[in-house]
Image (tube, rainbow, N blue to C red):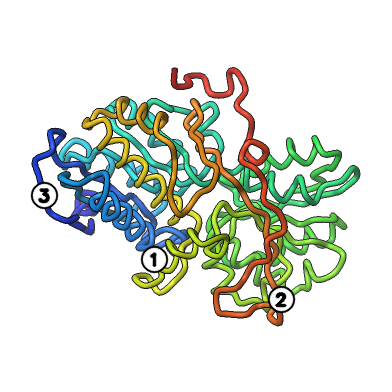
Amino acid sequence: MRLLALPMMAILLLASPARAEWPGGSVKLGVLTDLSGVYSDATGTGSILATQMAVDDCLAAECRGMTIDIISADHQNKPDIALAIARDWIDNKGVDALVDMSNAAIQLAVPPLVRDKNRVALFAGGTARLSGDACEPQHIVQWMWDTYVQVAGVARRLTKPGTNWYLVEADYALGKQFEEDTNNIVGAAGGKVIGVARHPFPSTDMSSFLLQGQASGADIIALANAGGDTLNGLKTANEFGIGKDKQKLVAYYVSVLDIKGLGLPVAAGTVLTEGFYWDIDAGTRAFSQRFFAKQNAMPSQIQAGLYSATRHYLKAVADAKSRDALTDIRHMHSLPISDDVVRNAHLRPDGRMVHDYYVFQVKKPAESKSAWDLYTLIDTVPGNDAFRPMTPGLCPKPLN
């Protein structure tokens, strides 16, 4: 079966050799990513690179004397394939931590596995259920973004009493979570979702769905999808002039790589939120330039988040001198989070990492001063205001 051959496709990246004996043994990371599908630009080889950068930086500092290996594979956006690879890695290859898994259906499938196998999963973002009913904070952390914060940043800024929204939504777990969060956040601000057009995942033709949104008369049309679906949506919206007049166009999840690929004439004016942008400050610029030198592209917020999460995990492993999942997770919670990627960050008992978040508008071509100068910063939202509050019972098993 081809499924059994998938781990053979893994890319093995060996970190620098150990300089001294470390009592915890070799630490192995498994980057389970999208190498061929709609999320491959924002994850894929860039996720592997970001993880390797975190390994290299830790080996030069807190992780001196450790041996750290990375393997990787393509999950093909299929939960059954992802779980088969992850189980093989844990049972037969000694993987301690799974990294990336940027697909909502896969994210919901992985936590029970790492709980049962006593391993760690490092998510750069995804469904807000990972810090809600699907939380497993003894074994997982959710780092950069989630569906709630992607909605909250733009929805709170744009919604006034009486504002009407229309969703063009991917018909699977990610889109359904975006819809739930939009209804809650927009409703609380006095607005209303007046319609939803659900499209297949993935979808190559977004015309009918966007025309329904345009015809609805909604004040705001939101692309409640990601990856290639969002790109197709933005291209189609530009063709129909959506977002160029009184109707605003919002993209819940779009990366700087997407905007660069589309070009400013197509994407200009789109409002979006991201937890990372290369040009926020000196630290983000330094990290991004290092990444760019190897990838020839600026990092997406997922890739930057994987660097930050992996770096912090490795610091915790080195501090704990242990490969036990719960021990390392507890050390992740106790250590301060400090790197070139995130600002004012802390890890909550539900496994959600909270940090400053940003609302951007895509620049017009005349406003851009360089190839990657793509966003105008509209607002910086403190993490405690941006992310869904931690309320009793939302995560049934918070870390004690």
Give the CA separation, mark 1 to mark 2. Answer: 26 Å
Left or right: 189 as drawn, with respect to 110:
right
Q: Secondary structure at mark 3?
A: loop
Q: Residues within 10 Å of mark 2 (few under 14, many from 20)?
A: some
Lower sequence index among marks 2 and 3: 3
Mark 2 element type: loop
Q: Secondary structure at mark 1?
A: helix
Most extreme residue toward the left is: 21
Say the numbered circle drawn on residue 364.
2
Q: What amino acid is at disc 2?
A: Lys
How far apart marks 1 and 3 lie (CA) works out to 25 Å
Nearer to me, 174 or 258:
258
Q: Residue at x 51, y 44 (%)?
A: 126
Q: Nearer the viewer, mark 1 or mark 3?
A: 3
State the residue at coordinates (41%, 36%): 109
Quadrant of residue 139 in the image?
top left
Q: CA distance from mark 2 to mark 3?
A: 51 Å
Which of the 4 image quarters holds residue 108? top left
Residue at the image position 35 percent from the left and 47 percent from the top: 311
The residue beneath circle 3 is 19
Q: Nearer the viewer, residue 376 or 219?
A: 376
Specify few, some or many for label 3: CA neighbours under 10 Å numbering under 14, 14-19, or 20 or more: few
Quadrant of the frame with the C terminus: top left
Q: Which amino acid does the dot numbered 1 rest on?
A: Phe
Residue drawn 68% across the image and 55% down it = 359
Q: Position of residue 340 (x, y in %)?
A: 45, 54
Mark closest to the chain's N terminus, 1 or 2? 1
Residue furthest to the bottom: 366
The residue at which mark 1 appears reads as 291
| Residue 173 shows in the view | no
Horizontally, residue 390 falls left or right of residue 85, namely: right
